[in-house]
């Protein structure tokens, strides 16, 4: 049955019900009027009859009284009859007749009263009958309407429920409307309207700023045509509001959520990508304008990761280093200026006059210190400057003067040893500076002091004694190396410093720092002027030892770099990594020449043979592999250790290869025959090894803090050097073999004199 017909029948039923009610009301009113009329008439009749009866009753009473009087008279007559005679009998007879008439009148009055009572009773019974008839008519009409309504409701219930759900929807009663439409099943467009309840709820929530509520409702209608737009708006609107309020974190969270929506939605909604960038750019600008440089860098760095080319971000990042560097220079905060400039140079070596400013950060304090007679401080400032730029203004002259002027003072005060030490340093820079030769020739005590200054360093070794402890590093010392002339020891540590020590007395000559790279280990070139930083970020960074000038970054490994070795000619570098490969690099341009692959574990150590033709690598796979440098071919595999190989080293004559392992042994291999010569057993796990220049002695540093010396020819333990309190990471012989250096995790380096 169609909806129009159902509606028609419903209207008809309602109309019939109304008509029945109206008819019942009309009949009840008419019956009431009739009953009231009958009642009024009956009342009037009754009153009339009562009045008449009362009149008759009064008459009866009067007659009765008369009768009584007559009776009394009759009695009197009767009495007199006995005495007198019968002449008085007639009045008594008349009185009796009157009494009879009064009695008749009283009977008629009683009859009238009885008739009035009967009429009233009949009226009451008629009224009751009419009421029963009216109630029956009303009940019948009501039942008819109810039956018609039930029939119509059963036929019209879906339409009624639909209309009720629509009313709830218009009143924003979402849950009631939703339940109503859901209960209707497939009736008309009920499923669509059920979806509409969520849609309108979402729209209302967006208008009132209830973002989470909007997103929850949207989850119920993922296929709605506007779902994508509304979901985007639920992130976009609060993001815009947060941006305007300076709530950068909230804005980013909303925008990140918006741009990371899956493919079903629009991740490029409106200007969301731009706003996301603004959520970094605006706070960066605020911090920048407030001179909060570190805060600005954090924001700019994150923005550059997101979009390196956004607005002037790159320039602002550079300025966040440049401006505080300028401020620090103007304030005489030289170290602070160098830190800022060093980071800026690592970022962009050619930015503005950064290179000049870096040089000034050394030159200006050097000039101040020299003018104040603070010679050591002047040299500390000048030496890194000279490593950066030997020709910068008159820095070379200032450096020479920092030795010459105190030397002249020492001669004048007859401090011959001090004067000799200063002149030796000066002659190392320039042998004929000013009148130095004349000063030596004219002062015999000075000449004797020069001859006697370093005799111990060149005697034949007979014993080993601790020479001196070099303290100053604040973190583990990873490497030690001697300068080519043997007068200086260079140490590198995890505290991001390289320190240069005077060998004969252990004095710290200078310290160089770097700031922008965290290294796992540090390796110095044979010349001592280049430092290689091996990092867990899979790279090797090359710098001058000053830490100021960045040479190059070697990128290519896929895991942490554990070890590097410089080629003997200084043109190549090999690196071993946890990616199980060894890579060969050209130092001049950082080009990767070749990759050596074959190890099954991370490579812990690499070493070049003295002739540079062979490369050895030790790995956690327990093996030592030998490679042909020229073409990268694999030559030999040396298998003898029971645990990972931590260190490898060639003897200077190239005849022996030493391998140190976590199994606590050192194995000496004859390179030409690939044969194991002998096994040494130091006191603990091997950390580092070094051969003496004559190839006769092997120094082994171990994790228990000791250094042991072994005779290569027969494997005899010669000496055990104790003193370190942490693992020994590096050992090195001086060029003449007279001094041994060790670097440890106890943050110190030690010099041992071999006599």
Image (cartoon, helix red, strand yellow):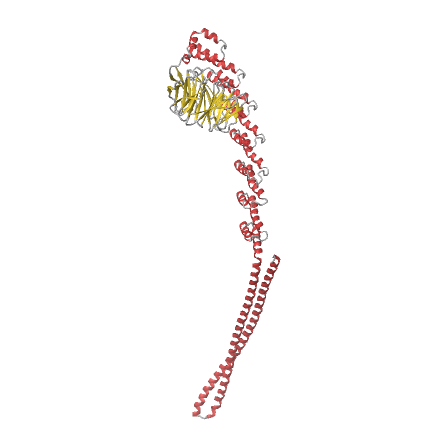
How many numbered marks, from 0 up?
A: 0
**Residue pushed farthest front?**
673
Residue 248, given in percent of the width and then of the height, sits at: 53, 35
Residue 626, given in percent of the width and then of the height, sits at: 47, 23
Quadrant including the C terminus = top left
Q: Is residue 374 visible?
A: no
Residue 217, given in percent of the width and then of the height, sits at: 54, 45
**Residue pushed farthest bottom?**
85
Quadrant including the N terminus = bottom right
In this picture, is 569 found above or below 51? Answer: above
In this picture, is 643 found above or below 719? Answer: below
* Of 680 and 366, the residue lying toward us: 680
* Of 21 and 429, the residue lying toward us: 429
* Of 194 and 14, the residue lying toward us: 194
Residue 544, given in percent of the width and then of the height, sits at: 50, 20
In this picture, is 170 found above or below 499? Answer: below
* Of 326 and 66, the residue lying toward us: 326
Q: Is residue 660 visible?
A: yes
């Amino acid at each position: 049955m169609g909806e129009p017909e159902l509606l028609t029948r419903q209207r008809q039923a309602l109309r019939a019900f109304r008509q029945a009610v109206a008819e019942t009301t009309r009949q009840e009113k008419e019956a009431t009027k009739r009953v009231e009329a009958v009642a009024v008439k009956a009342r009037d009749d009754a009153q009339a009859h009562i009045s008449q009866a009362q009149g008759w009753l009064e008459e009866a009473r009067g007659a009765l009284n008369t009768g009584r009087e007559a009776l009394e008279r009759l009695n009197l007559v009767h009495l007199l009859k006995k005495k007198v005679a019968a002449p008085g009998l007639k009045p008594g007879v008349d009185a009796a007749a009157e009494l009879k008439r009064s009695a008749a009148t009283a009977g008629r009055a009683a009859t009238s009263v009885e008739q009035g009572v009967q009429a009233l009773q009949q009226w009451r019974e008629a009224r009751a009958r009419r009421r029963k008839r009216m109630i029956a008519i009303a009940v019948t009409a009501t039942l008819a309407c109810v039956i018609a309504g039930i029939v119509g409701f059963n036929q019209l219930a879906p339409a009624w429920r639909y209309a009720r759900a629509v009313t709830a929807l218009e009143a924003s009663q979402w849950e009631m409307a939703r339940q109503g439409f859901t209960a209707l099943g497939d009736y008309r467009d009920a499923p669509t309207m059920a979806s509409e309840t969520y849609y309108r709820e979402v729209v209302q929530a967006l208008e009132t700023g209830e973002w989470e509520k909007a997103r929850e409702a949207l989850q119920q209608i993922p296929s709605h045509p506007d779902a994508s737009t509304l979901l985007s708006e639920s992130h976009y609107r609060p993001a815009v509001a947060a941006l305007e309020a300076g709530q950068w974190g909230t804005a980013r969270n909303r925008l990140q959520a918006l741009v990371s929506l899956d493919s079903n939605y629009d991740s490029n909604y409106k200007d969301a990508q731009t706003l996301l960038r603004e959520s970094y750019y605006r706070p960066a600008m605020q911090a920048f304008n407030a001179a909060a440089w570190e805060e600005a860098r954090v924001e700019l760095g994150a923005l550059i990761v997101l979009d390196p080319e956004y607005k002037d971000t790159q320039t602002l990042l550079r300025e966040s280093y440049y401006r505080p560097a300028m401020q620090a220079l103007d304030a005489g905060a030289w170290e602070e200026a160098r830190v800022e400039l060093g980071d800026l140079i690592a970022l962009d070596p050619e930015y503005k006059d950064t290179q000049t400013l870096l040089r000034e950060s050394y030159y200006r304090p050097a000039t101040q210190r020299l003018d104040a007679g603070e010679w050591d401080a002047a040299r500390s400032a000048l030496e890194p400057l000279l490593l950066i730029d030997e020709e910068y203004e008159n820095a070379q002259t200032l450096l020479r003067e920092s030795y010459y002027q105190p030397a002249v003072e020492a001669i004048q005060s007859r401090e011959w040893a001090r004067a000799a030490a200063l002149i030796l340093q000066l002659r190392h820079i320039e042998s004929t500076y000013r009148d130095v030769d004349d000063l030596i020739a004219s002062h015999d005590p000075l000449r004797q002091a020069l001859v006697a200054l370093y005799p111990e360093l060149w005697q034949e070794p007979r014993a080993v004694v601790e020479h001196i402890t070099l303290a100053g590093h604040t973190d583990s010392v990873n490497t030690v190396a001697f300068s080519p002339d043997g007068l200086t020891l260079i140490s590198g540590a995890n505290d991001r410093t390289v320190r240069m020590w005077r060998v004969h007395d252990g004095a710290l000559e200078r310290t160089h720092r770097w700031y922008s790279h965290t290294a796992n280990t540090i390796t110095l070139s044979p010349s001592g002027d280049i430092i290689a930083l091996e990092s867990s970020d899979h790279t090797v960074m090359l710098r001058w030892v000053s830490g100021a000038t960045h040479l190059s970054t070697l990128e290519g490994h896929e895991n942490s770099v554990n070890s590097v070795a410089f080629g003997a000619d200084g043109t190549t570098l090999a690196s071993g990594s946890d990616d199980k490969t060894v890579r060969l690099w050209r130092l001049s341009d950082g080009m990767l020449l070749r990759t050596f692959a074959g190890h099954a574990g991370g490579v812990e150590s690499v070493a070049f043979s003295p002739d540079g033709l062979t490369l050895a690598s030790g790995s956690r796979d327990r093996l030592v592999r030998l490679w042909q440098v020229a073409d990268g071919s694999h030559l030999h595999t040396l298998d003898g250790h029971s645990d990972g190989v931590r260190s490898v080293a060639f003897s200077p004559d190239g005849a022996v290869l030493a391998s140190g392992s976590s199994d606590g042994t050192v194995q000496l291999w004859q390179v030409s025959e690939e044969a194991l010569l002998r096994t040494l057993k130091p006191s603990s796990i091997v950390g580092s090894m070094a051969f003496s220049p004559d190839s006769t002695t092997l120094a082994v540093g171990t994790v228990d803090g000791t250094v042991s010396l072994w005779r290569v020819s027969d494997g005899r333990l010669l000496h055990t050097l104790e003193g370190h309190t942490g693992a020994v990471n590096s050992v090195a012989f001086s060029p003449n073999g007279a001094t041994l250096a060790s670097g440890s995790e106890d943050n110190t380096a030690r010099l041992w004199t071999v006599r």
